[in-house]
Image: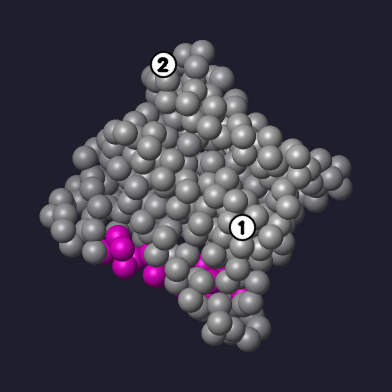
Amino acid sequence: MSVLTAGLAAAAFGIGDFLGGIAARGTDWRRVAAISLGAGLVPIGVAAAFNSHSLEVLSWSWCLLAAVGFVCGVSLLYRALAAGHMSEVAPITAIVAIAGPAIFDIATGAALSFNLIVGLTAAVLCSVLIAGPMQATTLRSANLHLIGTALTAGAGLAVFYIALDRLTGAGAGIASLFAIRAMSFAMIALFALKRSRGPFDRMSTPAAVAAGVIDGVATILLLWAFGSGPLAQTAAIASLYPVSTILLAMLILRERPTAVQCLGLAMAIPAILLLKST
């Protein structure tokens, strides 16, 4: 069940990123991130209203850590989308987002099986191939700023995955997720107010709001997935979100994937099946 839930979360995250990327084309990415994170409070708040589970005192530190990781990961991804560098940033981001939780999981006593190693390797390779052929050019050009952005975004997502897994392991529920999202929104809203530049395109608002609502639903699914599945496998599957982003770009924007990207898309299912069998 955790594999299906994590897969649905990955699909939703990819759709949200696609819509966020569309919105970021028309206005400052900071504003798009703020609107998106604010809109995401709605589905999480509704879910929390039907869940009376209270936060434990010790959970607040994990909530704050998850919020910081989520803000770093999401905002830097929006920045990359706004700059048109998603295909360059995605490989490094995905590798860190997959490897970080796996290393943490193994370091804290998780069993290291052959299927797990192969599945994680396949997930990383899948993400790299889906990103297209531009990553080699990025590394050759020694664009340290872009690489740093990718590493920070991936580290942020990895921290978010680990903290969310710790919260579910401690029995925290939707209320903790609402607290994480509220903290994230406060952080990015203050940052956007201070740093946003240029005119605000009202036409970008619907896409940003839709991205946030879908992303909110995705985080609820991810919470459920971590509640029933191991950290490394769940985080790896959730990090395959570029699959739905690429598919939407093909269907809506009429973008043509390269042969390398098609190979990456084809590898997604075997990677998930390998992780499921661990």
- What is the crowding at mark 1: few (fewer than 14 residues within 10 Å), some, or many (at least 20)? few
249 with respect to 19 (left or right): right
> What residue is pinned by disc 2?
111
| Magenta stretch prevailing secondary structure | helix
Residue shown at 54% from the left, 19% from the top: 117
Residue 136 x %, y %: 81, 41
Q: Quadrant of residue 187?
A: bottom left
274 with respect to 178 (left or right): right
Residue shown at 71% from the left, 64% from the top: 83
> What residue is pinned by disc 1?
251
State the residue in front, 83 or 71.
83
The residue range painted magenta reads: 28-45
Residue 75 belongs to magenta span: no
Q: Quadrant of the N terminus?
A: top left
Amino acid at the residue labelled 1 = Leu
Residue 125 x %, y %: 65, 31
